Image: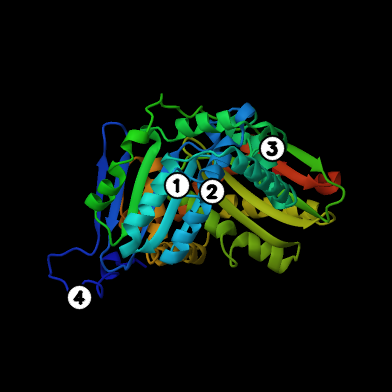
Amino acid sequence: MMFDIDSYFKKATSQKSKSSSPINLERKKLQNGITFVTESISCFPSVSAGIWIRGGSRTETPEINGSTHFVEHIVFKGTKNLSYSDIYKAFDKMGGVIDAFTSREIMGFHFRVQKRHFEEAFSILSEILFEPLFPRDEMERERKVILEEIKMVNDSPSDVVADLFMERAYPNHPLGMPVQGSEKVISKMTIETLKKRHRELISPQNLIVTATGDIEMNELFSSFKKYHRYLPQTKKREFRPPHFSKGIKIFERKHLEQAQIVLGFESEKASSKNRYALVVLANILGGTMSSRLFTEIREKLGLVYSISSEHIGQYDSGIFAVQAASSNEAAPRTLQETIKVLYDFCKNGPSKEEIEIAKENLIGGLILSLESTSARMGRIARNELYFGRQFDVKEAINGIESVSSSKLTSIARETFNPKKMNVTILGRKSALKGVDFSVLERKW
């Protein structure tokens, strides 16, 4: 079923003239490299805005692994004019929210407030990012917080196996390093290292500034203008191309009641022309509670509590991963049955019903996200980071709708190849007992 996106804002525009548009997308790129994008939607009473930095932990070296994430924390600890308490109280008083995150390829700072508080909120966000004080006493306190965060991750087997998988899939490459760093490196990190890392990150060519809601480009640009002088022009750091490494390895943890499993395959980058087929494929196999893996492995066999599949597109590479957790005793069968599901898909392809459900599920999620200014703001930021351009929701919907059964079968056969497979297991050595991966050898 095709979705009519033009009718989505019909109510919102019923009081406007016929020539007016409910949404106005505007993009501006400065000579120094900063990109601004606004999505003006006057019927929304709020504004979500963010400053996004291209280059997360994958632009680090092993000696400073975790420094980007540390910078994300420490900049909230005070500026020349604001203490960390002032920052949080201001947003509490506005009834808004402010947050930040660090991933392997992106560092993001964003907020959501009522329109009348936009200028104040954006001024605070900009001051946090471009004028941090790096107070030494706060750094030591925050170091303790980050070390606790690392311990929390290390106490979560599903998080640990994900990091171990990335380490093995991309050995000796920044993509294989954990975003949060290690206790050893974080414990020794100096304030000089963080200041240098901060200067590298906020170089203009790394910055994308976005806003969605009751906002115009001139308002966003004007609010940002005074902070230009704080931006150091440093040499652009290109991403070092990764090389996916295949293999099978168990990291023995005898104390764990469950085996944590990641079955991953080398796949395509976020901007690949096959991205829609890969997303639909992931949805059919393990994206919902009616998906094949969930139905076969959990509902029919009762081998797991959770199992899922996902296409993870990166700037210049990608992974198609199936992640599951089962008892140590059931792990071999869980793996073998998972391989059987992948094999059956490659051999017979998807059913018409599976394709319809997956497409409607993905399009439905996309349409529902349009009601959130935060989700819209994040989408236009990712468009810039991974595509270098903006495209509307129609293009994404059309891309999903255009995926055919033959394309899904073809992309599955190309992806689920033992020569492009990395299996990482956290548990006991018996998890691989009797498992036959050769079932996936090409026979098509």
* Residue type beneath disc 4: Ser
Near mark 4 (Cα within 10 A), the count class, few <14, some 14-19 or many ≥20, is few
Q: Which of marks 2 and 3 is in front?
A: 3
> Tags 4 and 1 in contact by the CB under 8 Å rule?
no
Sequence-wise first label, 2 or 3: 3
Q: Which amino acid does label 3 sit on?
A: Ser
Left or right: residue 304 compared with residue 374: right
Res 362 quadrant in image? bottom left
Disc 1 marks a residue whose amino acid type is Arg
Q: Which of marks 1 and 3 is in front?
A: 3
Query: In this figure, which residue is indicated by the disc labeled 1?
Result: 275
- Residue 211 spot, x, y in % from top left: 33, 53
Q: In this view, does 332 lie above or below 34?
A: below
The mark nearer the N terminus, 1 or 3, is: 3
Q: Which residue position is annotated with label 2?
A: 311
Q: How far apart are marks 2 and 1 (CA)?
A: 8 Å
* Secondary element type, mark 2: strand
Q: Earlier in the sequence, mark 3 or mark 4?
A: 4
Q: How crowded is mark 3: few (under 14 residues within 10 Å), some or many (20 or more)?
A: some
Can residue 444 be seen at all in this image of the molecule? no
Within 10 Å of disc 1 (Cα), the crowding (few <14, some 14-19, many 20+) is many
Amino acid type at circle 2 is: His
